[in-house]
Image (cartoon, rainbow, N blue to C red):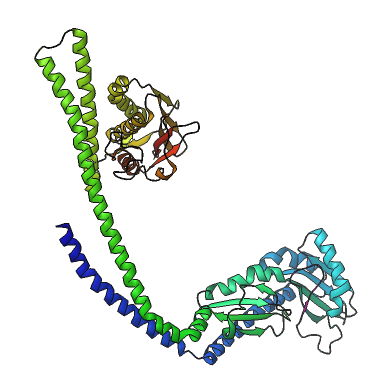
Amino acid sequence: MEGGRFRLWYLILVPAILVAAGILGFYTFRSSREYTQLGDETIAQSLLSVAQQRVERIERFIVIADGTVFRLVDPNDSSTVDSVWLPQAEAQTPSVRSVLLLSPDGEIIQWASREDKRTRRAFLRTFRQQLLESLDLDSPEPYVLRHVHVYGDDDRGGYLLSYRAFDTSSGQLTYIVAVHDTQHIVDEVLPRMFGSDASTQVYNIVDESNQLVFGPDLSDVGVYTVDHRFPTTLDGWRLQVAPRQAALLQAQGRSRMRGEATLPLMSFAIILLSAIFFIYAAEKERRLNELKSELMANVSHELKTPLSVVRMFADMLRSNRVPSEERRMEYLDIICRESERLTSLIDNVLDFSALEGGKGPYRLKQGDLGEAVSRALEAFHYRSEQDGVEIRLESSDELPPVLIDQEAIALAIINLLDNALKYGGQTPIELALTGKRKFVDVAVRDHGPGIPADSLRRVFERFYRGPDSSSTRGSGIGLSLVQHIAQAHGGRAWAKNAPGGGAVVGFSIPVAAI
């Protein structure tokens, strides 16, 4: 039946994969031909137009800031630099760091800066020693707005100075100079301007020595890069623009013939990978079936042993073949203990069956985690007492409220205790409840050999049993149920090796919102 089902899947999916490979090859070939037909000249013209528009936009931003400065500063009243422009500078002209009023012979009439005191002193010294001489104060057209981009010795992006002459009431010319912060333009203005086009074009700006100022390196894009200089403002800087798919276009142009030849190889690779996937899926299904068969064998063995013990001692009690009252109580204890084992095993199998069926049998309501722990300890009492194993309970004074299914949490704790009992031998078992800000941890520690490193990630897998567990009874579903119960409560299960030996296995569930 299973083999026929797999053959049916093969008959349906393999032709579908072949058709998909053919469609993929067709569209890949067509796309390659379309990209090859793109003309380099058309691309370059389009990119150049984009570059010119972006340069004009940046320069317009600078010119608008200059106009705002000239509007706020009155050349007839030098105090407006401090009283009018400076209070509004950050909001109105964020890229302008300093404003100066100059006489035609270069004397500073008044100036103000948004920088700190130390930076202001350094700028003033730099302005007098290096920047002032770059201003053309003897121009025959002093009323025309001019820009000078000068590199100083103490900055990264240079100084961008915008200046223009104004008439005063005394008949003298006064120059208003706005000093722009080029680093602010690079860090704040350019990302905003280019962010909307990031999906289609890639931009950068380089200086006169071809050093990168803004954006990514485009040196590997080749013929698909165009640049445009800043004509009036940022002298020496160039805006470079390339299509985001430039590298793809260039690679396709070089290897279109080679790409067409690889299409059959791509189809074969897809088919091969698909075949490997189906083989893997079939092998996984086969292995899962083997594990289920092993589960049934283990469960049958687990059921057979306690049932045989219960029946034997029940027959002895019924036939009055008990030598003493003390021995009678011992037989009853054995029957109770084996019954608890049966109950635990059957609960595990039923819950596992519900898990396999995709059902969610848990009813969560606000409750006391300590009560669920008490129920688990009470149910596990016979087994721990009979095996002579001490269970030590450590709990925080006040545990936060949680949303739990009491029976499911008790079952999870019983499975943790059972796991610790099987692998810890006669050593004590430590059960710890720890309340945290968002979670409550339930951890069970044994003092056995610990968990091998390669098994730590697999202990919660269905049917998984460690490499050294062949002599240890169990079905391989206990910890899987612990993980399922923890996840159903919005938490998680975890396992680790404890310092000093032994293993700690537990789960965390979230604190209930109050």
Q: Which of 453 and 512 is in front in this view?
A: 453
Q: In which quarter of the image is the C terminus?
A: top left
Q: In this view, does 285 lie above or below 514?
A: below
Q: In this view, does 91 lie above or below 330?
A: below
Q: Does the magenta stretch include residue 152?
A: yes
Q: Where is residue 133 in the image (x, y as percent from the top left)?
A: 87, 79
Q: Position of residue 246 (x, y in %)?
A: 53, 81
Q: Which of 259 and 469 is in front in this view?
A: 469
Q: Which of 292 and 220 is in front in this view?
A: 292
Tell me: 238 left or right of 286. Answer: right
Q: Where is residue 333 in the image (x, y as percent from the top left)?
A: 23, 18
Residue 497 visible in the current orientation: yes
Tell me: 158 left or right of 384. Answer: right
Q: In which quarter of the image is residue 304?
A: top left
- Residue at 88% x, 72% y is 128
Q: Quadrant of residue 49?
A: bottom right
Q: Quadrant of residue 329?
A: top left
Q: Which residues lie in the magenta part?
A: 146-157
Q: Which of 213 and 1 is in front in this view?
A: 1
Q: Does the magenta stretch include residue 449?
A: no
Residue 358 visible in the current orientation: no
Q: Position of residue 302 (x, y in %)?
A: 22, 33
Q: In which quarter of the image is the N terminus?
A: bottom left
Task: Count every numbered label the image shows and give the total.
Answer: 0
- Residue at 25% x, 55% y is 285
Q: In this view, does 195 lie above or below 382?
A: below
